[in-house]
Amino acid sequence: MLHSRPEQRPPVYLSAFHEGAARLAGRLAAGVWTLGDPQSAPKVIGAYGTACEDAGREIGTVIVQSVFSYAPDDDQALEAAREWKGTMVDRHYTDDIADPAQIYRNGADEVPPVKRIKAIEKLGADVLCLMNVSGADPHVALRFYGDNVLPELRKG
């Protein structure tokens, strides 16, 4: 049991997929969390920064999320990640779309098959959160990522 309070209050990050939520994060939260979409993320991050300035607050942590998938070949990796494409369509968070098949179709039609980590990195995030969607063997993906991708990202 925890019978004492932490020395400082834990940070609260607000998830934002468009500017309205980002402005709320700028007024109230320790940071903003958004998707790594090179088209929408700059608007969200910009609205967050402006709201922080308007509220007389320092800009907090900017977290950008995306997915990664690994498999022995590109087709298998893409197939494992395909079901997550629906989470990258903005209107799925604002419109009344409840049919999983429609969400899947929208993702397949509207999200490019490959988004590069380097492009996401340029969005101005303090933290890049990559969700492993590698299907049946996520441990292989984590090892590959740690051995091959992280060293390349650290080179700058």
Image (cartoon, rainbow, N blue to C red):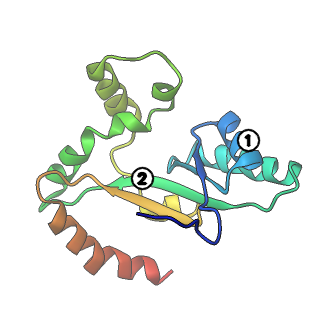
Tell me the number on the disc at residue 68.
none
Sequence-first disc among 2 and 1: 1
Q: Taking 107 as reference, is 63 left or right? A: right
Residue position for label 2: 66
Q: Position of residue 62 (x, y in %)?
A: 61, 59
Looking at the rendered image, the disc whose residue lies closer to the viewer, 2 or 1, is 1
Determine whether 111 is above or below 11 in the image. above
Determine whether 96 is above or below 53 in the image. above
Label 2 to label 1: alpha-carbon separation:
22 Å
Q: Position of residue 97 (x, y in %)?
A: 41, 17
* In-front residue for pair 44/5: 5
Residue position for label 1: 23
Q: Taking 57 as reference, is 89 left or right? A: left
Q: Position of residue 119 (x, y in %)?
A: 50, 60
Q: Taking 147 as reference, is 37 left or right? A: right
Determine whether 31 is above or below 20 in the image. below
Which residue is depicted at the point 55% across and 67% down? 4
